[in-house]
């Protein structure tokens, strides 16, 4: 199926977006992607009344459909109606929560080209309105996960814009971010990090 961005450019999924179908189930991650883990985490928060946070739907406009059978329709071409902002949003203890989740197969650094300018702009606006904004970064090869506040991300983004390195080293994430260990319930307890940073009771 062909999918295009609002500007007409063809959308090409990243390789790690197809990991779920290729990955063998193991005891360490049970074949789950970062998105799966976060969806399970948010489901846990919702069921226990801890927070209401959901993955944002991406609006798509379908422009070509084939009907090979009467009972089946195959979408051949579609466009994203608008540029995506971030992956998840919701509310926790009266505060607006907004965050992006990214995975990388790199083992020592996280490439900043995983983010887009419009996403950074959106996160800046959330911060200006006193929302809690952050990114969850996963090193899939080493099963390491980091919580990085949007404010810290902006620092590395500006460094890149000004001609500096185009990635965040894992060491920099260890210093500026918060490591999150994979659990059972919840899988990725980012609320625990929020409580630590913002001193919620």
Image: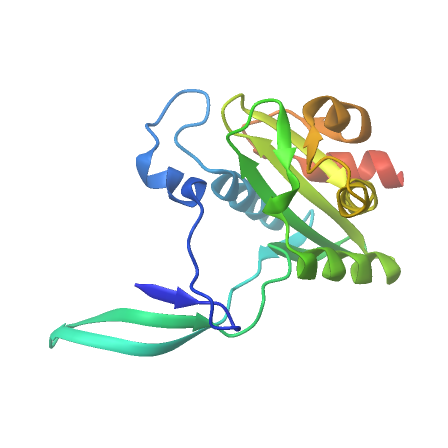
Q: Residue at x 73, y 21 (%)?
A: 171
Q: Position of residue 139 (x, y in %)?
A: 56, 29
Q: Position of residue 91 (x, y in %)?
A: 73, 57
Of the pair 156 and 73, the residue shown nearer to us:
156
Query: Seen in the image, is 6 located left or right of residue 176?
Result: left
Of the pair 139 and 116, the residue shown nearer to us:
116
Q: Quadrant of the C terminus?
A: top right
User: Is residue 95 among what the camera can see?
Assistant: no
Quadrant housing residue 127: bottom right
Query: Seen in the image, is 126 located left or right of residue 77?
Result: right
Quadrant housing residue 109: top right
Q: Residue at x 83, y 42 (%)?
A: 155
Q: Position of residue 59 (x, y in %)?
A: 50, 71
Q: Residue at x 75, y 56 (%)?
A: 123
Relative vertical location of residue 82 with respect to residue 178 in this rendering, above or below: below
Relative vertical location of residue 168 with respect to residue 60 in this rendering, above or below: above
Of the pair 160 and 67, the residue shown nearer to us:
160
């Amino acid at each position: 199926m062909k999918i295009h961005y609002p500007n007409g450019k063809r959308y090409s999924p990243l390789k790690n977006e197809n990991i779920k179908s290729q990955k063998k189930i193991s005891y360490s991650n049970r074949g789950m992607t970062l998105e799966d883990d976060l969806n399970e985490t948010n489901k846990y928060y919702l069921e226990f009344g801890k927070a209401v946070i959901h993955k944002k739907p991406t609006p798509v406009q379908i422009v070509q459909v084939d009907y090979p059978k009467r009972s089946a329709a195959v979408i051949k071409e579609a466009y994203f109606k608008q540029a995506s902002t971030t992956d998840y949003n919701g509310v926790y203890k009266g505060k607006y929560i907004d965050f992006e989740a990214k995975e990388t197969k790199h083992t020592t650094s996280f490439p900043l080209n995983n983010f887009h300018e419009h996403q950074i702009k959106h996160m800046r606006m959330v911060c200006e309105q006193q929302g809690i904004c952050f990114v969850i970064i996963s090193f899939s090869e080493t099963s390491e996960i980091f919580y990085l506040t949007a404010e810290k991300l902006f620092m590395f983004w500006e460094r890149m814009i000004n001609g500096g390195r185009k990635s965040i080293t894992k060491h920099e994430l260890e210093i500026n971010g918060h490591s999150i260990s994979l659990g059972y319930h919840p899988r990725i307890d980012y609320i625990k990090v929020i409580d630590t940073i913002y001193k919620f009771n």
